[in-house]
Amino acid sequence: MSTRTSALDAVVFGVDVQSGDVRGDSPSYALVAFDGEHVDRDVVSLRKLRRLVDREEPAILATDNMYELAADKDDLVRFLGSLPPGTKLVQVTGAERPEPLSRVASRHGVPYGKDPMKEAEAAARLAAMNVGQEVSAFTDKTSVKVSRGRSTGKGGWSEDRYTRRIHGNVKRATREVESELQGAGLDFEKEVTEKYGGYSRAVFEVEGTPDDIPVSARRSGDVRVEVERERRDGIEFRPLAKRRDHVIVGIDPGTTTAVAVLDLDGNVLDVLSTRTADMAAVIEWIIERGRPILVAADVTPMPETVEKIRRSFDAAGWTPTSDLPVDGKQHRTREEGYENDHERDAMAAALYAFDDHEDQFRRIARKVPPQFDRGEVTARVVAGEESVEAVLTDLEDDESEPEEESEHTARELSEEERKIKRLKARVERLEDHVEDLRGTIATKDERIEEYEAELSEARREERREARERREVSRLERETDRLERELEEAHERNEELEGKLERLKALWRLDHSNFADVAEEKAGLVPVKPVEQFTKAAIEDAERRFGLARDDVVYLRDASGAGRETARRLAEVEPRVVLRNGNLSEQADEVLFEHGIPVGPAEKVTIQEIDELAVAREVEVEGVVEGWEERAEDRRRDRNAEMVDRLISEHRADRDLDEVRGEGD
């Protein structure tokens, strides 16, 4: 078979049954390959036909009856699924109710003969002229499924490791497929099933055909990739050439040209307003939307630009008896949408033209039988000024086929022949009934498939919502955790800022110069107040502004402290302790033993600033010196007491010895 493409972009195959039947054994087909100039002919089997289609990848596989290639609907779907991505199956005789091939060929001037090879050639030539309906069983969506290539049973390793490896490979392949789809710029939705160690399955719903997708089906080791187009609910027919219906056009020319297009029922199809488009561009815009039978203007006489466009379409013209008033145009277009006055004027011209011919359109529609194109008849009556009857007669003559004349003499049927005729009629009725039942079954099967598809979709949606709920819950928990951490950080920050402020205040105390103090800066000393002589108060002061060796500590309330509290303060090794109130004997003893000077606070002038304070150095020194004098006296008293106690003990021991001697 030749694959030359000298006239067409690609080769077209036309086929017709040569002998046999696809429902039987070994049908053969007349095959014609047409490239626009050359025709190659051959007789092939169904298997060879499929091999040729796979090898040559024709743009179109044309036939007059799609069920010559498939036994039933399911077989047809399988056949369509086996075609190369760039090959279309086209039924040149129409959609659900095909016409005879001879009539279609005659209408388009294509040679026709009853020989199968002639019919195959006619089908190929018609398809090359964009005549016919493309047969489709698939949408433009494709499902790419990545799944396990083998069972997760024991595979030589421990079962857990084996399963984890398979699911990890499926997850890795899923990422590769996703990367390839993103690299190709394709839109898709992904649904994954997570399992131990990775994924057990991932499904991509891709907007595109398998020909657009850079992923091919494969099976290797642990992973299997399947590519399958999404099936339609049934068989769909799409015309190869877009049909252009007859329309009514209103035009408002000028610096801004506006065009409005209506169908024959008076519905606005489209509106255009442009400053840049020339007349050729306007005509092309109209051609894309239909075939005008009326071209209207809102003024009289018809402007020259509108007249030229009317003549280019050989359409009838319409103008009002006088220029349409603005309020009339506003009222007539009140239910339509437009962006400026030019679009309104063009729309009004078209609507008024429709109003003027509406009764005529209805009369034509009532007279035209269903098998004829109402638009074609209306165009010839309105633009060509022919009668409806003359047009219908002409169309019937065009569609009539020459029939072979044969003379025969009717004879009376015998009883046996009449019985056979009755039985054949009964068989036909029963066959029709069987076909109806099959149709009912098929309808129910399709409905079941729809319900199953809806159920699957509902389950997918439920799973997606469950994943979303889990993700929302996780994010809410994460948000709560982060808010707690943020709150703790704020508290810590505030604590540090407070500490910093206290340290700054302390620094200011060390470097301040009080105006009411006569001494120089060196004659002042910072004082660190402690609210009570307790461990908690001491630790609080350390936390707020710190307590260090040689500090001057001011006890606002010195009462109640015991030995342990006094030892805690002695560990700081302050220079002096200024007290309000009296110390307990135990605390005083501990501080004395550690050599910590203690004196009354009233002997020192203390000036407090916020939490801290300052005092005169000489007064603090006076307290220290006074304590040292008292300490010296206290030590002498203790020494004297100790000497007296030793003397007393010695005398007591001597007297005891004398008494013992006298006794002896």
Image (cartoon, grey):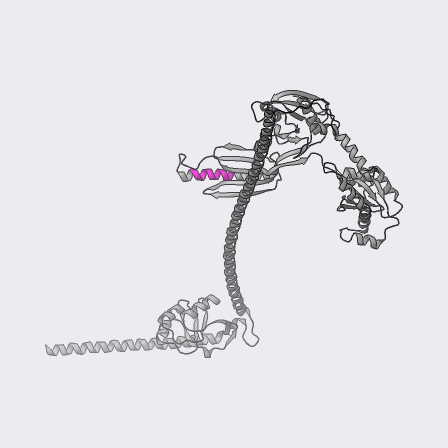
Residue 232 lies in the magenta stretch: no
Q: Where is residue 484 in the image (x, y as percent from the top left)?
A: 50, 59
Q: In which quarter of the image is residue 84?
A: top right
Residue at x-position 66% and y-position 31% = 90
| Up/down of 656 relative to 360, above or below | below
Q: Position of residue 104 (x, y in %)?
A: 72, 29
Looking at the image, which is closer to me, 538 or 589? 538
Looking at the image, which is closer to me, 171 or 244? 244
Looking at the image, which is closer to me, 386 or 427? 427
Q: Position of residue 659 (x, y in %)?
A: 14, 79
Residue at x-position 44% and y-position 36% = 151
For the N terminus, the image quarter is: top right
Q: In which quarter of the image is residue 649?
A: bottom left
Q: Where is residue 209 in the image (x, y as percent from the top left)?
A: 61, 36
* Magenta-colored span: 162-172
Looking at the rendered structure, the number of numbered marks drawn on it comes to 0
Question: Relative to 384, is 15 on the left or the right?
Answer: left
| Up/down of 616 relative to 549, above or below | below
Question: Relative to 125, is 446 on the left or the right?
Answer: left
* Chief secondary structure of the magenta portion: helix
| Up/down of 1 relative to 525, above or below | above
Q: Mark yes or no: residue 411 visible.
A: yes
Farthest right residue in view:
301
Q: Mark yes or no: residue 284 visible.
A: no
Residue 164 lies in the magenta stretch: yes
